[in-house]
Image (spheres, rainbow, N blue to C red):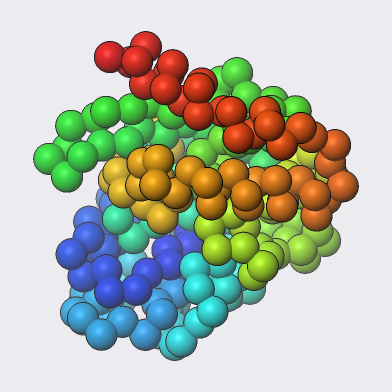
Amino acid sequence: MRISIITVCWNSAATIEKTIQSVQSQNYNDIEYIIVDGQSKDKTLDIIKKYPNVVSSWISEPDKGLYDAMNKGIQMATGEYIGIVNADDTFAEEGTISKIVNFLKSQPVDACIGDIVQHREDGQIIRRYSAKNWVPEKLKIGFMPAHPAIFFKKELFDKLGFYSLDFKIGADYELITRYFLKQRISWKYSGITTHKMLIGGVSSSGFDSYKKVSEEIIKALQMNNITHQPWRIKSRIVWKIFGFLKRK
């Protein structure tokens, strides 16, 4: 089973080498690794070029943003399943993809979802983001599994569509809503911790982005004609604070 891994980057010289080395360290052989660069101006391309035996294919050209770049990577992919590792993240361990493949061989579903850990630059883990109790109905109140921890069957994108470019930071939410809630794809929770993610991504920068995220969640649900209550989505901050205090 071939697994396609996609990394989208732009001016990521400070972090992308660790990401590439994380893919390199995987003990599973049939990995297609694709990097889509947004025409970086720093040393990102020099780093990519150091790993011709790891990076299966890469492009560097202007794009319309993160999700446009993801769509390009998906169109380039030839694997049966597709996963994402962001340019400042790594896989949780060298056996991550092997575990995913073994799970998918035993559970031939459209998608599997797992867990991630989030950490600071010094490596200190500050949050474990588990999808163990997640179900698609929770999308109606603003909760989704960690996007990178989802491995999708490649044929889904051809059948059900790609990431919508109508969103700045919420196209992953819209796609997950479209796939899991509207189209009811088959899925299983793997229980596998797939990624270590560096705190500070586009949609995880504290409460500053909370309003924008909420607006795009509501927009995603409306686009897919999913009945929901906007006040519940806006009030999910209460559960976030509760979860933060509980971790303390």
- For this view, does 160 lie left or right of residue 6? right
Residue 219, position in %: x, y?
71, 52
- For this view, does 140 lie left or right of residue 29? right
Which residue of the protein is positioned furthest toward the left in this rendering?
122
Q: Nearer the viewer, residue 233 or 190?
A: 233
Quarter of the C terminus within the rendering = top left
Residue drawn at the location 34% of the way across and 15% of the way down: 245
The image quadrant of residue 23 is bottom left
Q: Is residue 153 shown to the viewer in this render? A: no
Q: Nearer the viewer, residue 128 or 81?
A: 128
Q: Is residue 240 shown to the viewer in this render? A: yes
Q: How many marks?
A: 0
- For this view, does 132 lie left or right of residue 141? left
Q: Nearer the viewer, residue 232 or 84?
A: 232
Q: Nearer the viewer, residue 177 or 46?
A: 177
Residue drawn at the location 34% of the way across and 60% of the way down: 87
Residue 7, position in %: x, y?
42, 63
Residue drawn at the location 12% of the way across and 40% of the way down: 122
Instruction: Tell me: residue 47, above or below residue 126.
Output: below
Residue 40, position in %: x, y?
31, 82
Residue drawn at the location 42% of the way across and 71% of the way down: 35
Residue 108, position in %: x, y?
72, 37
Instruction: Tell me: residue 152, above or below residue 74.
Output: above
The image quadrant of residue 190 is top right
